Image (cartoon, grey):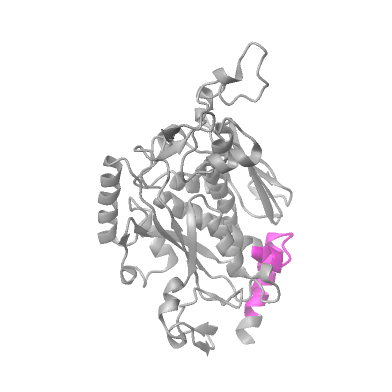
Amino acid sequence: MRFFTAGESHGPQLTAIIEGLPAQMPLTAEMINNELKRRQGGHGRGRRMQIEKDQVLITSGVRHGLTLGSPVTLTVVNDDWKHWTKIMGIQPLSEDINPEDIKRQITRPRPGHADLVGGMKYGHRDLRNVLERSSARETTMRVAIGAVAKQFLRQLGIKTVAHVTEIGGISTDPKSYAHLEVDELREIIEQDPVYCADKVASVKMVEAIDDIKGRGDTLGGIVEVIVEGCPPGIGSYVQFDRKMDGKLAGAMMSINAFKGVEFGLGFKMAQNPGSKVHDEIAWSEELGYYRKSNRLGGLEGGMTTGMPIVIRGVMKPIPTLYKPLESVDIDTKEPFVATIERSDPCAVPAASVVAEHVIATEVAKAIMDEFRSDTMDGLVDEINRYREYVKEF
C-alpha cells in the first residue's frame, strides 16, 4: 500500500490517493468522517475548527460500499476557500495586477515553522507559499487515510487507540487505566475534553490550557498509541529499512510538531538494568507464546512480538503565539515580531488522533507487505493460518 496527499491549507481542497488496498473491503464515507470529526475536537482547539466541517468524498476505488482493488481517492473540501480565492487562486496573475498587491503576503518567517528554511529551499519570497503546505491542515488527509487503514485492520481483528498522557508537564497515572482493554479505553477518552483516560489529570490539563491561552502562549505534550491484536513477526531483522520499530518511529515523527518517540518503557530503559527491561517469554496452550511483561512495547529485533504495540510521541508547543517571538523580515532584514496566523493554545488532543491514524497506516502497510492482499477474504484466511502456525511453533 502506498499513498500521496495534496492540497494547501487555504486551497480549494485536500486530496489523498491510496493504492494497494485489497478488493472487497467494506468502506464508506461515514467510517472516515467520524475520525475526521475527532481530529477537530479536543479542548484547546482554535477558530479554524469552527470554520471547517471536514467531510470526505470518496471519488474512486469503491463501488457499493466495497473497495475494488483500484486506487481510492479521498477529497475534503476547504469551506474557507471562498474567502481565499484571490489570495490562493490557481490562475496566473493578470498583467494589471502587481504581485506585491496580493493580500496576506508573508515576509516575516515565524520561529519554529518551516517558513524561513522552506523559502530558502524553494526560492519563495512570499512565505505563504511555504506555510500553506507545511501547515498541520495536511494531517486531515493523514487521518482520512488512517481511517481506511483502521477499517482494514479491524477486518483482521487488530484494534488501535490513542490517548493523551501529558500536557504542559501534567502527567497521567498509568495505574488508572492500565487494566483497560482497547475498546474500554476508547470509550473513556472519547467522552473526555482532552482525550485523557485519567480523570484527575484531565481536569488539571483543561485548567492549564485555559491558563496558557489567557497568557497568549501554547502547550505541548505526549500522546500514546496502542495497537492490539497484531500477529508476531511483522517487520524484519534482516535489513535496517525493514525493521518495524524504525517504520513506526518514522511515521510518528512525520507528524507536524512531533520531536520525540519511544516504545514501551522508552527512555526509562536507560535508568534500569536489563533484568528490569526485557520481557520474559512464556507459553500456554490457549495463547501460544507470550511475554510476561511488555516493557519493550511489543517489538523485538525489528519485529512485532504479538504483544500490544505501545508507542509514544512528544509534541512541542505550537510555535504560532499570540505573543509572537522575534523574527527578521526577509526583504528589509529588519527585526520584527513574527506574523500571527490562526493558532491553537494546545493541539495535543487532536495530535493523538493523528498519531493513532499514522501508526495504523504503517501497521496496515506492513501487513500488506507480509501477506498476499489482493482480496480481503484471501488475506483474512492467510493471516488466520499464520496465527495458527506461530501459536503451535
**Which quadrant: the N terminus?**
bottom right
Q: Is residue 340 visible?
A: no
Magenta span contains residue 359:
no
Vertical order, 378 against 345 (above or below) = below
**Which quadrant: the C terminus?**
bottom right
Decide which of 30, 246 is in the foreground and name it: 246
Task: Specify the quadrant of the image occupied by residue 96.
Answer: top right
Give the extent of the magenta segment: 366-388
Give the x, y percent position of residue 252.
53, 58
Question: Would you say 284 lies left or right of 24 here?
Answer: left
Vertical order, 175 against 328 (above or below) = below
Decide which of 29, 231 is in the foreground and name it: 231
Decide which of 340, 360 is in the foreground and name it: 340
Q: How many marks on residues? A: 0
Question: Would you say 107 lies left or right of 5 here?
Answer: left
Give the x, y percent position of residue 137.
52, 41
Residue at point 57%, 31% (across, down): 11
Residue at point 56%, 66% (across, down): 157
Question: Would you say 316 lies left or right of 130 here?
Answer: left
Q: Is residue 111 visible?
A: yes
Question: Would you say 8 lies left or right of 22 here?
Answer: left
